[in-house]
Amino acid sequence: MPLLTAENLQKTYVTGEARVTALAGVSFAVEKGDFVALMGPSGCGKSTLLHLCGAMDRASSGTIRLNDRDLSDLGDDELTRVRREQVGFVFQFFNLLPTLTVADNIALPCLLAGMKDQDAERRARALAERVGIAHRLTHYPQQISGGEMQRAAIARALIHQPALLVADEPTGNLDSENGANVLNLIAGLNRELNVTVLLATHAADVAAAATRILKMKDGKFE
Ligand code: ADP
């Protein structure tokens, strides 16, 4: 059974009089352990699709199933629970909280889920070591580099052991060397932890790390 399936997914944003069709009927399946790269020009609907797959937003029509649950059937609270328990997110601009240390940023999803401080800290330290930022745990985000911030964000996204890692342009704000390192890191974690990865990008070399590439244009797969 695939981890994720979408059938004829459509999304239209309505702002006042304006209607923008961001997804015009998308169907696909992602198997457990896959690393899927979504590629396509800015505005083609990549982020919209990631948001729907990550239970951050609802489709206008069509169905999306994550771990065999139809997300369109879920109420807001249930959708939030699916997102918190089963999905990890990595963003282009890292989205670390500036008032928390790197250690606390990484541990936060576990602390919010009610895990004991010590256990969350232990997990945060182990992941920080794996992503190569153990020496930055007591720093604040503004004291570390962009590449380190993204490593911390990746650790935060994985600390609750989600089934799905959703990454929206994770290298878009990094130089090419740091971008390549972050990509290799995600590919390594995909294999080691068997976490399924769905990643959007428009950088061609980024897709080399993926096991599968899906090209999008005008809200559809090409
Ligand atoms: P990509 O990630 O490929 O750049 P997006 O999914 O962000 O594409 O956007 C697809 C289309 O939907 C674009 O035309 C964009 O302007 C529009 N769009 C995205 N989010 C919103 C929103 N919240 N409200 C209105 N229009 C939106």
Image (cartoon, rainbow, N blue to C red):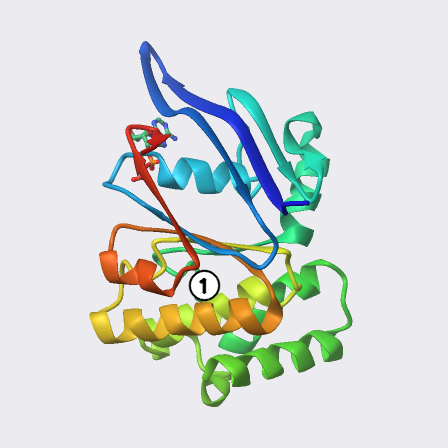
Asked if residue 109 is positioned above or below residue 55 in the image, the reply reads below
The x, y position of residue 101, in whole percent, is 50, 75
Furthest-bottom residue in view? 135
In the image, is the residue at mark 1 within 8 Å of ligand 1 by its beta carbon?
no
The residue indicated by pointer 1 is 96
Q: Which of 208 and 109 is in front in this view?
A: 208
The x, y position of residue 2, in whole percent, is 63, 45
Q: Which of 92 and 4 is in front in this view?
A: 4
Q: What residue type is labelled 1?
A: Leu
Q: How many discs appear?
A: 1
Q: Dot 1 surroundings within 10 Å: few (below 14), some, or many (20 or more)?
A: many
The residue positioned 58% from the left and 37% from the top of the image is 5
Asked if residue 215 is positioned above or below residue 94 in the image, the reply reads above
Can residue 99 be seen at all in this image of the molecule?
no
The residue positioned 59% from the left and 62% from the top of the image is 195
Residue 143 lies in quadrant: bottom left
| Left or right position of 65 against 98 | right
Dividing the image into 4 quarters, which one contains the C terminus? top left
Can residue 31 be seen at all in this image of the molecule?
yes
Asked if residue 85 is positioned above or below residue 105 in the image, the reply reads above
Residue 13 lies in quadrant: top left
* Ligand 1 in which quarter: top left
The x, y position of residue 139, in whole percent, is 45, 82
Dividing the image into 4 quarters, which one contains the N terminus? top right
Furthest-top residue in view? 17
The x, y position of residue 188, in whole percent, is 48, 74
> In what element is the residue under mark 1?
loop
Q: Nearer the viewer, residue 127 or 115?
A: 127
